Image: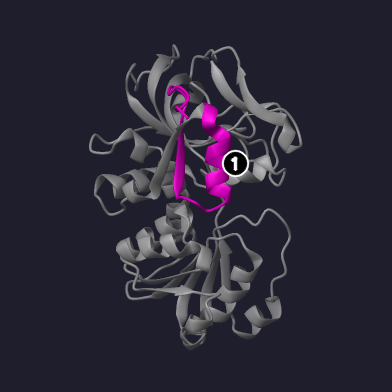
């Protein structure tokens, strides 16, 4: 089967290869991949900014169909439409595992970084981490359930957004636009901020219900930005950019809540003295947990989150370089790679 593999450090060590299809154990499912989204984490792995166990097949935001079932699995059948949590390997006995915090297990290995992932024709997952896709959700939409589960973890499980709260979301990429919608579902009023490079994304934020938008590097909006300083109850930093983190800190009210959602990929400067003097509460979230997935799928099924407008491109897996370029150059929103499409014509 075709798979996108990174063999070691360096961008030269990634490419499409033919490998044997995976076999399954008694408690696993073999899934025929429908489509897999390119995540910021995939970009960080490409650029050696996120740890991985090489060689490894990348990709963790996917949807697919059950193709084979382990002998101990009783609650799935061939053809079921599924998505899954990413923590494929955990110890099962540590404090974190026993409390359902799989991503914090010291022995955790996730698909796409610790074990082979879903930028391939097939992926193997533990059946206990799989979820059936609601009937009214398309398989392309289902491929965004993983980032949505991450946002559920951030907004609902790790942060507190009360009805009527004024909330700023910094960074209108896929993560920011999902955050916007989950915050709205929680009753918050959202202003989305971005840069001049984000104009198309900010426009979509408005279409998805943002109360207002601000282009932070536009001199014509400087006065507007200044008027918002110190006015927000909660700030979600979704861009993974150091200047944005600083901006969020200034936008917050005293005693406001700062939430790191984006991954910076490196150490950044952060004004903890200002945070102290404003008595800013600080929290964050790391990916998702099993509790996040049930809520994410409920939000999709109920239509409270709309992911369709976030899918800007769908390409064959062999066109992965083009897909990564689109993501890295902010030329689209969510890019899906389909391992079963043949190469697009020139």
Q: Position of residue 279 (x, y in %)?
A: 59, 81
Q: Position of residue 257 (x, y in %)?
A: 52, 73
> Does 326 appear above or below 31?
below
Q: Position of residue 21 (x, y in %)?
A: 54, 13
Q: Which residue is mark 1?
A: 42
> Does 114 appear above or below 185?
above
- Callout count: 1
Q: Residue 322's quadrant in the figure?
A: top right
Closer to the camera in the image, 164 or 95 = 164
Q: Position of residue 259 (x, y in %)?
A: 54, 65
Q: Residue 97's quadrant in the figure?
A: top right
Tag 1 secondary structure:
helix
Res 183 seen here: no
Res 3 seen here: yes
Which color scheme does this rendered protein use? one colour
Residue at x-position 42% and y-position 73%: 167
> Does 276 appear above or below 298?
below
Residue at x-position 36% and y-position 18%: 74
User: Crowding near pointer 1: few (<14 within 10 Å), some, many (20+)?
Assistant: many
Q: Residues in magenta? A: 318-346
| Residue reaching furthest to the front | 346
> Does 148 appear above or below 242?
above
Residue 104 vs residue 199: left or right? Answer: right
Residue 37 vs residue 113: left or right? Answer: left
Residue 112 covered by magenta stretch: no
Residue at x-position 53% and y-position 46%: 326
Residue at x-position 24% and y-position 49%: 302
Residue 341 covered by magenta stretch: yes
């Amino acid at each position: 089967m075709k798979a996108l593999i990174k063999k070691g450090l360096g961008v030269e060590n990634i490419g499409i290869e033919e490998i044997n299809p995976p076999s399954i154990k008694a408690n696993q499912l073999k899934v025929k991949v429908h489509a897999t989204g390119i995540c910021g984490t995939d970009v960080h792995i490409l650029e050696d900014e996120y740890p991985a166990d090489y060689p490894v097949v990348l990709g963790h935001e996917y949807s697919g169909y059950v193709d084979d079932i382990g002998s101990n699995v009783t609650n799935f059948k061939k053809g079921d439409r599924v998505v899954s949590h990413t923590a494929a390997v955990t110890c099962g006995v540590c404090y974190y595992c026993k409390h359902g915090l799989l991503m914090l297990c010291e022995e955790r290995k996730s698909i796409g970084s610790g074990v082979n992932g879903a930028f391939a024709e097939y992926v193997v997952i533990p059946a206990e981490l799989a979820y059936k896709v609601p009937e009214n959700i398309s398989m392309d939409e289902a491929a965004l359930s993983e980032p949505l589960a991450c946002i559920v973890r951030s907004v609902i499980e790790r942060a507190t957004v009360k009805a009527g709260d004024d909330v700023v979301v910094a960074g209108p990429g896929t993560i920011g636009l999902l955050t916007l919608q989950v915050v709205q579902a929680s009753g918050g009023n959202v202003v989305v901020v971005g840069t001049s490079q984000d104009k198309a994304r900010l426009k979509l934020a408005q279409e998805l219900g943002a109360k207002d938008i601000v282009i932070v590097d536009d001199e014509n909006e400087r006065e507007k930005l200044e008027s918002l300083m110190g006015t927000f109850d909660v700030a979600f930093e979704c861009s993974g950019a150091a200047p944005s983190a600083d901006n969020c800190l200034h936008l917050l009210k005293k005693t406001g809540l700062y939430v790191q959602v984006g991954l910076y990929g490196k150490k950044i400067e952060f004004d903890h003295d200002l945070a102290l003097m404003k008595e800013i509460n600080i929290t964050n979230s790391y990916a998702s947990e099993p509790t996040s997935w049930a809520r994410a799928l409920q939000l999709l099924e109920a239509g409270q989150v709309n992911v369709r407008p976030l899918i800007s491109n769908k390409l064959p897996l062999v066109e992965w370089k083009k897909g990564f370029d689109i993501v890295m150059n902010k030329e689209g929103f969510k890019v899906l790679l389909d391992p079963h499409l043949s190469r697009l014509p020139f």
